[in-house]
Image (spheres, rainbow, N blue to C red):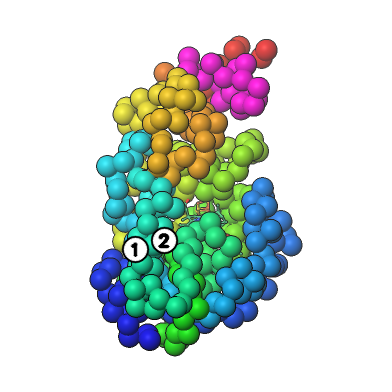
Amino acid sequence: MNQSVTQILSNFPDIRFGFTPITLPSTLPHYDSWLVQNFYGEMDYLVRHRDIKANLKTKYLGANSAIVMAYPYVPHPSKENNPFPNLNVALYAQGLDYHNWLKKKVEEIIAKLKEHFPNENFWSCTDSSPVLERDLAQNSGLGWFGKNTCLIDRKAGSFFFICEIVTTLNLEPSVSSPKSFCGTCTRCIDSCPTNAIISPHVLDARRCISYLTIEAKSIAKAELRPLIGSHFFGCDICQTVCPWNEELEPYMLNQDGINELQFILDSSDEELKNKIRGTALERAKPLGLKRNALIVTANQQITSLKHSVKRYLGHKILRELTKWALERLHDQKETIT
Ligand code: B12
Ligand code: SF4
Ligand code: SF4
């Protein structure tokens, strides 16, 4: 059985994969402790999904195994679709939304598996499914849990997506879990601008720039805003400093980036929606992107965009943030209203 599945997957050379039985996740106690400490912020779905994650068989009836896959996103497979190529956007998001294209790829694999195993069931999972993906991937031999919490492989680094096919097939576990190669290194913990990695393997999402610029609907607290720096959407610092990842060019804001910020601030929500359609940036919605643009403009001291920032002084949600941004742009008079 393993052999036929392996043969089908070998037609997808970009994908690393492994197999694991569906059992009680060994890292569930870490997940529970993380939830209890409220590190999830506004991501309530992580609480709602807890019981399914603990026992996948309650959702995927008759499931026995997971085929777990890792798909690299550096270089990004659809870089030409990056709507803001000059802004500081996390590497995974520099193109089309993987929830769509990766899902299609997984469904292509499922179609092939179905031809071979017509009486078995296969369910595709990519990120948003109630699955402890790093746990399954670690169990399948795809990497170890880095101190930055990311799954890391010695050859592939950590710039890869994780996705799964949960199945009724009874597959032999492929390999034993890899040991950690973090050693005494603490680069990720030391480099995080917001001290979000509060101890090895534990991330307080409420402080993480990725959360603050993508997942959070609210606006970052004033003390965290300067620490967001130039990050417009997501953050890769704890991965770019990791010795297991290839070295990448550091980000520098240029005039084209300033023009992109201006476009975001001057556009209507409809114009912005059209610009980001189908890309990973849709997740933050126009309001989230405008919020992020205000923070980056202030942090980068782009005084030439003061006029665009001032448009938001009357905005019912972004008003306070706008005042903060104008203060940072040294426009005290305008902010006292
Ligand atoms: C919520 C979420 C976030 C949150 C919280 C992240 C976090 N670290 O908890 C935020 C918004 C901050 C986030 C950010 C990012 N995310 Co995210 N995220 C998720 C999501 C939906 C759930 C993660 C979760 O349950 N977190 C709760 C913690 C407790 O669980 P965990 O991170 O999985 O950690 C496990 C292990 O570390 C282990 N563990 C915990 N404590 C300890 C302690 C010890 C000692 C040990 C050994 C193990 C251990 O147990 C945990 C449970 O299995 C998953 C998809 C999914 N369905 O799983 C993607 C996912 C984890 N994210 C992903 C990515 C790509 C990112 C970003 C890189 C995006 C970006 N550039 O901005 C950053 C990376 C930030 C970081 N350092 O983690 C990938 C990770 C791929 C990889 N190679 O690891 C995933 C798997 C999505 C995917 N399908 O590819 N994310
Ligand atoms: S993604 Fe950025 S903010 Fe979040 S833990 Fe890593 S370095 Fe810190
Ligand atoms: S930076 Fe160092 S400690 Fe952090 S994940 Fe990479 S190897 Fe591990």
- Residue pictured at 47% horizontal, 40% vertical: 282
Principal SS element in the magenta part? helix
For the residue marked with disc 1, what is the amino acid? Glu
The N terminus lies in which quarter of the figure?
Answer: bottom left
Q: Which of marks 1 and 2 is nearer the N terminus?
A: 1
- Residue pictured at 66% horizontal, 14% vertical: 336
Labelled disc at residue 161: 2
Quadrant of residue 94 within the rendered picture: top left
- The answer as to whether callout 1 falls within 8 Å of ligand 1 is no
Residue 320 part of the magenta-drawn span: yes
Q: Is residue 21 visible?
A: yes
Q: Do the residues labelled 1 and 2 touch (CB within 8 Å)?
A: no
Q: Can residue 185 be seen in this view?
A: no
Q: Is mark 1 on a helix, strand or loop?
A: helix
Q: Position of residue 23 (x, y in %)?
A: 59, 81
Between circles 1 and 2, the one closer to the viewer is 1
Q: 274 and 321: which one is in front?
A: 274
Q: Position of residue 334 (x, y in %)?
A: 59, 12
Where is 10 relative to 81, above or below? below
Q: 108 and 236: which one is in front?
A: 108
Q: Where is residue 120 in the image (x, y as percent from the top left)?
A: 46, 77
For the residue marked with disc 2, what is the amino acid? Phe
- The answer as to whether callout 2 falls within 8 Å of ligand 1 is yes
* Alpha carbon distance from label 1 to label 2: 17 Å
Labelled disc at residue 108: 1
The C terminus lies in which quarter of the figure?
Answer: top right
Decide if residue 332 is on the left or right side of residue 252. Answer: right
Q: Specify start and end residues of the magenta stretch as a single range.
A: 306-326
Where is 134 relative to 256, above or below? below
- Residue pictured at 44% horizontal, 28% vertical: 272
